[in-house]
Amino acid sequence: MCELAHATSKCKQTQFKAKHDSLIVRRGKKRAVIAVAHKLLEVGFTVIKNKQPYKDPNIDYQKLIVDKNASRWLKALSKYGYLQKQG
């Protein structure tokens, strides 16, 4: 679990990195890694207990979906005449 905690502390913009960064100043590297490992166990238990996928509170999933699909949606709107080309 500590290896996983150390790896998640390297990820960008996750709740685990934020927790690691906040604890590393006050408690040190080793205790921060143990705390993140404990948090991972809590999250894992909750995911299994509730039978729902994990969603990081620091990530805007709606924005990711829009960014990924916006060009395809605009092409479809243009194809069916709902969006007029300007120019």
Image: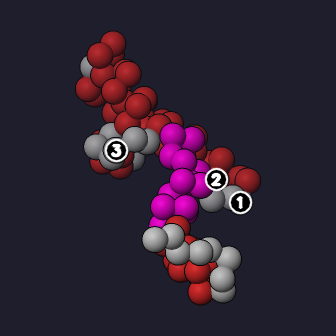
Q: Earlier in the sequence, mark 3 or mark 1?
A: 3
**Whole-percent x and y of residue 49?**
71, 53
Mark 3: amino acid: Lys
- Choose between 20 and 45: the one closer to the eye: 20
Q: Is residue 71 magenta?
A: no
Magenta region: which residues?
54-68
Q: What residue did someone put label 3 on?
A: 12
Provide the secondary structure element on which disc 2 rests.
Answer: helix
**Whole-percent x and y of residue 71?**
48, 72
Is 6 positioned to the left or the right of 83 in the image?
left
Neighbourhood count class around disc 1 (C-alpha, 10 Å): few under 14, some 14–19, many 20 upward = few
Q: In the rendered structure, are the residues bearing label 1 and label 2 in contact, judged by CB atoms less than 8 Å apart? A: yes
Task: Reply above or below: 49 against 10.
Answer: below
Mark 2: amino acid: Val
Q: Which mark is residue 47?
A: 2
Asked if residue 31 can be seen in this view, the reply is no
**Whole-percent x and y of residue 70?**
52, 67
Which label lies toward us, 3 or 1?
3
Q: What residue did someone put label 1 on?
A: 51
